[in-house]
Amino acid sequence: MSHPSRSGYWVLIVLALAVLVPLFSLLTQGNSSDVVGLNFWQSHYLRQVLFFSLWQAFLSAGLSIALALLVARAFAHHGAFPFRSLLLRLFGLPLVVPSIVAVMGVVSIYGSNGWIPLGRSLYGLNGILLAHVFFNMPLAVRLLLPVWQSIPPHHWQMSEQLGLNRWQQWRHLEWQALRESLPGISLLIFMLCLTSFAVVLTLGGGPKSTTLEVAIYQSLRFDFDPHQAVSLALLQLGLCLLVAWGSSLFHKLPDVEISLSNTPLNTGIVGRYMNTFVITAAVIFVGMPLIAMVIDAFNNSILTVLSNPGLWLSAGLTLLIGISASTLSVLAGWLLLSTSTDYAMLGKKRKASVIEMLGSVVYVVPPLVIGTGLFVLLAPHINVFEWAIPVVILINAIMGLPFVVRTLGPAMRQSKMRYQHLCENLALTKWQRFKTVDWPLLRKSVGLSSALVAAMAMGDLGVIALFGTPEIITLPLMLYHQLSAYLIPNAAVTAVFLLGFCLSVFWLLEKLIGGKTNAEY
């Protein structure tokens, strides 16, 4: 291989234009002193929004991580727990379940007519914390559990031989393994809570419980104040970059492993009972809202909602956005990784890693910030709402690119390094190599990447809420409107429909693209 592919550079150029131009439009909007100067700090409302954004993210992430540590440890110590693999799949649902569906699940349990009614106190910080823990605690469990599995079995055996008690095992074995990964995982969960939109928009309950993401949306769609939206967007971007910089200091971040070993550990009878209690409580906490939502969906409104043509039009638009964003994101990821793997084959690993990092750096830019930049940039020249669908597809494709790089990258590098010289010796053309070598080896990863990006795009509420109109409504936006109007029976039906729709598309894409080589997840 004499010359590496240049396709990745074109992807990076398009990515830079799609991200930097909107950000530049924010920086140049109006008088810079009004946007980022002292006038910003003189606003009591903006200071309150900033404080609440950080406070709710700190509490949400702290609760999610604290509970996840207990649950992950219980799973690690109780490898023989019944239906363990099935329960871990349940804990993987937040990767593909739309956040607005999680909100509906929380309302089904803790709403006025729920199983554990909290009434009006659900709307505000209480509801936000409940929804964030419901959504992020299982994800944190999946991130933390591999840390326990990284501890060699002979270390446990040695600790038993030395007569270490549970506290000493935690201090000398478990904590030593966790201390490297825990800060990075905590900052990741903090970032997810800081940039949460659907949860706060639906359960915030008023101006006192408004975050930066929601305030940006309100400034553009309700207050028609682009200057304030720019101030909020720049502040949100600065916070996210600060958190991302903090995360970069902690390089060891485990993958969300799908198949996990169940090496049995000798925890004793009391420990086994405690682990069983913790796992059972966690499963009830995560599963109860989903079960309640499905039960609530079977009500007198089910035929009305399902027979509404608007539901099916919204479903078609949601599918169009998901498939289009997935296709663009996977194609861009493939081209980007082709260049990076070529450089890796030539021994230029640093250059290869920089290319992949540039393709993933967009993860630290909230989609609503990009959307705000495009809104401010395009609004003086065109009717931005007429371009809502292409803009939503573009932003979701961009936000899905880091997942494609992370999922497809390892498989692509492995294929290139194993078979590059063989393909050159056989003088295979690019098409022949793709058909006979690359595709059979990579289709599983491509299928998973496509399914992940499609599910995330189909469940997105933030960007479509900014650009949507009465004629352009996706299923998440329809569900939000129903929840805002307190049409809870209709919302329950729509939420279950959206959940089933996203999971079906995820499963079909993974199966159809992944083919027979696709393992069960």
Image (cartoon, grey):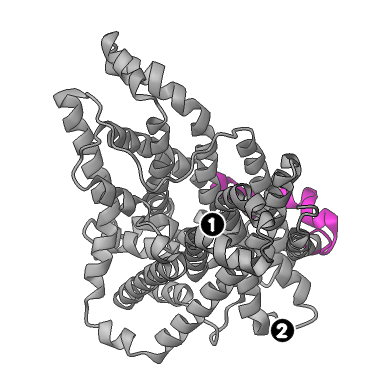
The image position of residue 136, as x and y in percent, is 42, 49
Residue 405 lies left or right of residue 311; in this view the side is right
Q: Is residue 159 visible?
A: yes
Magenta segment, prevailing SS (helix, strand or loop): helix
Amino acid under disc 2:
Asn
Tell me which residue sits at (66%, 63%) in the image: 428
Q: CA distance from mark 1 to mark 2?
A: 28 Å
Residue 388 lies left or right of residue 297; in this view the side is right
Residue 43 falls inside the magenta stretch: yes
Tell me which residue sits at (40%, 16%) in the image: 172
The image position of residue 285, as x and y in percent, is 27, 50
Tell me which residue sits at (40%, 76%) in the image: 482
Instruction: Please name the residue that numbered disc 2 is placed on.
Output: 383
The number of callouts visible is 2
The image position of residue 344, as x and y in percent, is 70, 45
Residue 20 lies left or right of residue 497; in this view the side is right
Viewer-nearest residue: 199 or 45: 199
Instruction: Please name the residue that numbered disc 1 is placed on.
Output: 210
Amino acid under disc 1:
Thr
Q: Which numbered disc flags the more N-terminal residue, 1 or 2?
A: 1
Callout 2 secondary element: loop
Residue 264 falls inside the magenta stretch: no
Q: Quadrant of residue 295?
A: bottom left
Residue 347 against residue 395 in the figure, above or below: above
> Which circle marks residue 492 in the picture?
none
Callout 1 secondary element: loop
From the image, state whether disc 1 or disc 2 is nearer to you.
2
The image position of residue 48, as x and y in percent, is 59, 50
Specify start and end residues of the magenta stretch as a single range: 25-54
Residue extending furthest top? 162
In the picture, which quadrant includes the C terminus?
Answer: bottom left
